[in-house]
Image (spheres, grey):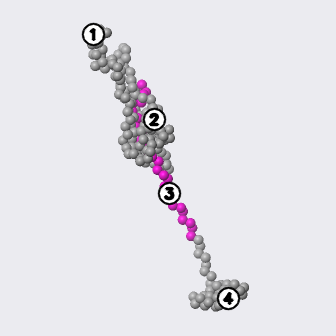
Amino acid sequence: MRTGQTALILVLAAAGGVCATGCGPPQPYVRYDGAQFGRKPKPVDDMVVLRAGPPPAPARYQDLGTVVVTCPSQMAPVAFGGATSIGGCNYQWAVRQACERAAQAGADGIHSIDTATSGSGATISLRASAFVRLPDRVTAAAPTPAQPMKAQPTVQDRLRQLEELKKEALITPEEYQTKRAEILEEI
């Protein structure tokens, strides 16, 4: 390569027109702003992905934080004065990266996914909320209806029953006299 060509390449590189080896958009990265749930990570394939919104009712959940996947892109010049967008990432890849980071925090899934795309359709950023499912509320069992109170036997009924027990020799005459005295004493 001649000196004039080397100088032209350096000038174009400084102006952003030609990229030397290693140039291009920065590498994608994932950021998590939130709490750790305090349990070991779930397998990423078991994560729940709810693109449009939070878990539907009656499900109970708690948001842990926000996962942001950034896939930088930049405009690169092309022939005849045009430009094209290079960089960004695939949507599915970005969702998987968000799930991996949420799983590390102990989340059950992500919801409410919001994305930004480049002019070429590549995902340049993805934001989602990480959540955990909460156990269903324990509802108290419905109280059993009160049983109607049995009518207490009258003194006459109790004395008749005691007399029958004596006739059938199920109680002794002494027991009969003792119990009869107790019943009559209640009057």
Q: CA distance from mark 2 to mark 4?
A: 87 Å
Q: Residues within 10 Å of mark 3 (few under 14, many from 20)?
A: few
Q: CA distance from mark 1 to mark 4?
A: 133 Å
Kindly identify the residue that appears in the image at 38 percent across and 45 percent down. Answer: 35
In the picture of the structure, the residue carrying the numbered disc 1 is 3
> Mark 4 falls on what kind of element?
loop
Kindly identify the residue that appears in the image at 65 percent across and 90 percent down. Answer: 174
Q: Tell me the kind of residue under disc 4.
A: Thr
Q: Tell me the kind of residue under disc 3.
A: Val
Name the residue furthest top: 2
Q: Nearer the viewer, residue 89 or 115?
A: 89
Q: Tell me the kind of residue under disc 2.
A: Arg
Name the mark nearer the viewer: 2 or 1: 1
In the picture of the structure, the residue carrying the numbered disc 3 is 138
Q: Are marks 2 and 3 in contact (CB under 8 Å)?
A: no
Q: Residues within 10 Å of mark 1 (few under 14, many from 20)?
A: few
Span colored in magenta: 120-146
> Which quadrant of the figure contains the C terminus?
bottom right
Would you say 111 lies left or right of 185 here? left
